[in-house]
Amino acid sequence: MPLKIYTLSTCDTCRRALQWLRQHEVAVDEQPIREHPPTTAELRAMLAAQAGVVRRLFNTSGRDYRALGIGERLDSMPVEEAIKLLSTNGNLVKRPFLIGPGVALVGFDEVAWRAALSDS
């Protein structure tokens, strides 16, 4: 099963991540994050990989994040509510979002991606 990457076509970071993946011949199934946000299972797996820090899953600089006032209530928000928000609004999800067997990366950090994907 290939890795799945959720991206936004207008996101420079997503384009850099995809270019890096191509250069390193890592096969991925690309999904448009707005139209098809990560599933609740994928979000839970990513949350576990992020040491349970739910803030790491959110696109904190996004318009929807600010418009919904999530920043002010995130610390007291139940995890299940956060997961539901993320699974229903791809604009809220930090991108790129790369998930698959043994891999869970959010945002593009070349050093972290190289370490996680060195066996891919």
Image (cartoon, helix red, strand yellow):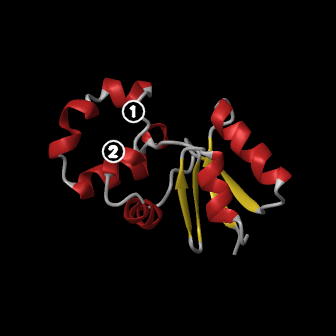
The residue located at (35%, 60%) in the rendering is: 51
Question: Is 35 placed left or right of 60 in the picture?
Answer: right
Name, please, the residue furthest toward the left: 76
How far from the left and from the top, in percent, is residue 24? 82, 56
Residue assigned mark 1 = 60
Please tell me which residue is depicted at 71% across the width and 66% down the height of the picture: 118
Q: Residue 58: horizontal and vertical position, in percent?
A: 40, 42
Q: Quadrant of residue 115?
A: bottom right
Residue identified by numbered label 2? 55
Q: Nearer the viewer, residue 37 or 95?
A: 95
Along the polypeptide, which appears first: circle 1 or circle 2? Answer: 2
Position of 90 compared to 111: left or right? left
Above or below, 6 against 41 in this view is above
Q: At which x and y percent is residue 55?
A: 33, 44
Q: Secondary structure at mark 2?
A: helix
Q: Quadrant of the N terminus?
A: bottom right
Mark 2: give few (<14), some (14-19) or many (20+) Cα within 10 Å. Answer: some
- Please give left or right for residue 3 compared with residue 35 in the image: right
Which residue is at a point 44% across and 28% down the rendered structure image? 62
Above or below, 96 against 83 in this view is above
Of 69 and 13, which appears nearest the observer? Answer: 13
Q: Quadrant of the C terminus?
A: bottom right
Q: Residue at x 78, y 63 (%)?
A: 27
Say what secondary structure mark 1 lies in: loop
The amino acid type of the residue labelled 2 equals: Arg
